[in-house]
Image (spheres, helix red, strand yellow):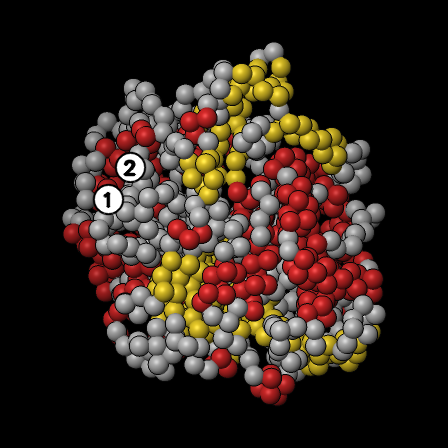
Amino acid sequence: MLRKLLRNRVIKCICMSVLLLTLICGGAIAKTIRQSFPQESGKITLPELTAAVEIHRDRWGIPHIYATNIHDLFLAQGYIHAQDRFWQMDFWRHVGSGRLGEIFGKSQLPTDRFLRTIGWGRVAKAEFSQLNTETQKILQAYTTGVNSYLEQHQNQALSLEYNILKFLNPGYKPEPWQPIHTLTWGKVMAYDLGDNLEVEIERSILLKTLTPQQVEDLFPPYPDNHPIVVSSKVSPTSNSKLSETIAFSPSPVPLHPSTTTLSPSLFSLSSHSPDMGIGSNNWVISGKLTNTGKPILANDPHLGVQIPSIWYEVGLHCTVKNAECPYDVAGFSFPGMAGVIIGHNDKIAWGVTNLEPDVMDLYIEKINPNNPLQYEFNGKWVDMQLVRENIQVAGEKTVTETVRYTRHGPIISDVYPKLKDFQKRFGIPLPKNAALSLRWTALEASNLASAIVKINRSQNWQEFQDGVKDFDVPAQNFVYADTDGNIGYQMPGKIPVRQGGNGLLPVPGWTDKFEWQGYIPFEKLPSLFNPESGYIVTANNAVIDKTYPDLISNEWDYGFRAQRIVEMITAKKQGLNFQDMQTIQTDNKNLIAVKIVPLLLKLKLSDVYLQKFQRILQKWDFQDNINSQGAAIFAAFWKHLLIDNFTGKLPLDYLPSGGSRWFTVIDNLSQQPESQWWDNPQTKNKETRDDIFRQALQGGVKELEATLGRNINKWRWGNLHTINFRNQSLGKSGVPPIEFLLNRGKFAVAGGNSIVNASNWNPKNDFTAESLASMRMIVDVNNWDNSLGMHTPGQSGHAFHRHYDDMIEPWRNFRYHPLGWQKAHIFKQAKSKLILQP
């Protein structure tokens, strides 16, 4: 995540020497590592509790917490999160607050400057004061639990990372947890799930060398035949036109080489490219289609590869569920946040996917050439609001950053690396003295924390909607099922209503023509309840069609995963069971291969050797399984098709990343064999689609020979497509002993880009998976104890703990564990029992 951590070579050498010496002393390293492992059995006294709390952990280290009141329940969750994941929580709160320099020194100053400019920490303070009293009390109880653990544990007793950190920053000591640290988590997740800003910048840069029509070729409309979640079946949704935003002068030169490269950046919160297919799958099946007569709900969020896991599985149970203590819920939580994000309680189940809404706008501000603290609005110079941020840097003097605010938000063009030299690199009209400000829903106070605790205790569709209504940032797709047999879909979120513009490009900020007019009312957001089809599928695909009156997004996933899920559901039509859900969730069918391979098979090849690969592809079932030879050959071809064809036509930083958008681009272009997009501008001849396909196949075969050897019988997709779980904070330090201690990999994995079993890889790099199905959940509403789950790499954040990486093998081999529900079952299966007592 932080690509240039531990930059200083002297520090690296010191760390390496110390750690190597420690490793040699095997007994010492074992003792050092184990002292941070959590106590899982016996009794622990916490004076802040009002009554005893029981915690039962199963064989995977998953705790079910039983408390007599709300305060103790969430206090215990905070304590348990800190036991297993405090370093992760500490790291993420420093990200959310823009305080990485306090831990890692001056190498993180550029990152902190950006994070302080957008100001999540300031927003969180305002947000906490606006939360209802009940949510505030829950966050305070959770905070008390975290701090109770900190009072009992310090330094290396907290986590191995602190033992490493003392060689880099010996003065660092974790401060007490605060409720605002919980709230900044939601902001970080909103950024990680949002591609909006990046795509606005990409379009602006592409227009420097391409015409608007050529850019539209690269951002095609949503396919007519792909699923729409809430559709009138009148007409498909489609992308807006660039020409509707700003008038452009067409580029006088067609496709031509461009080597523009973005400056390297320390800041890289998102671990994926904008169109890599990060998102999720969820679906819910009505009882009229299942073998039990009750709904089944499935969910698998796709997020960047990391260790520790982003998820922490937990059960939160009131010993006696009543009005005073209404929680009886199990599922997947975030360390650092109270409650359960995805899961079920005794009456309802819910799943979440990323909506990918358009909630970010870049505004072009005219800056007063005589006063950089003023900007123009409606013909007048307006004073900016100034906020001064004091940034502490380990081992250095405090740095003061002055943040300039316009009516739209903070000016980010000075501190965001991807906007460096935007005046030269953008292909849109810009005033001479310009800056770019950001308006984004995550820079306003939200109600996410309230939403989570309300959803957790909801007992029916109406209560669920009331809870989801507060899930405003980041906006998501929710599917729902209940014990009465109902299923539903609800889109929540702050979705701006724009006076003008369509969100595709930065817009003029000096006029009120592009201002936000508020947000779409919750009552008008798309929703479904017991649809006639008997199922609801969301996979980041288009939610609405052209009949919907407001703009929600131009950046939908192009629906290949949704199409495949719907195909598999409707193929059986009724009697769907749990095994069917697992089959769908782990499906590896490559739908772009289904479209492209027939064209490859028709190619006339004079090379007898290459003809062998046509015969292999002819027998391939289009499944990207670990042992598939055809999957390896097609992936190598696909990589060279994208990169070789578009190199010299697009800026290097915007070469294809292989996600669903590029599926659609290539599908469209493959139907235009004479398109100029196939022509190589650096050669005298005019290439066609078939010419480029031959070259890509040849290039792919050469790469496979170099990578896997000349014995094609040993070519397997899993030999190319691997996954490395790298510690988010220190896993890319460049210090081998540190990386050895904290990272885990390589592991062969199935799946790929825009496949239901999403393990996305970027052809600009290699075949290594950069994102994954971070967890899988299948919920049986007929019998909660039949429900299954699995996440990766494990429950623990402590390196070398038995639960640090024990979920990797079952996850990659598509095995699940019981989620656990009935108290008697949980107690019987428990491997340990811990009592927290006042």
Near-viewer residue (838 or 759): 838
Q: Position of residue 352 (x, y in %)?
A: 46, 60
Disc number for residue 217: 2
Circle 1 residues within 10 Å: few <14, some 14–19, many ≥20: some
- Tell me the element at label 2: helix
Q: Residues under labels 2 and 1: Cα distance? A: 9 Å
Q: Position of residue 634 (x, y in %)?
A: 31, 55
Circle 2 residues within 10 Å: few <14, some 14–19, many ≥20: some
Going by the image, does 732 lie left or right of 560?
right
Q: Which residue: 62% across, 68% down?
A: 795
Above or below for 749 versus 93: below
Going by the image, does 647 lie left or right of 437?
left
Near-viewer residue (170 or 366): 366
Q: Which residue: 18% across, 36% down?
A: 674
To which quarter of the image does residue 136 belong? bottom right
Q: Which residue: 46% across, 54% down?
A: 492
- The reply to whether discs 2 and 1 touch (Cβ–Cβ < 8 Å) is yes
Q: Position of residue 232 (x, y in %)?
A: 26, 54
**Residue type, mark 1 in image:** Asn
Q: Position of residue 493 (x, y in %)?
A: 48, 50
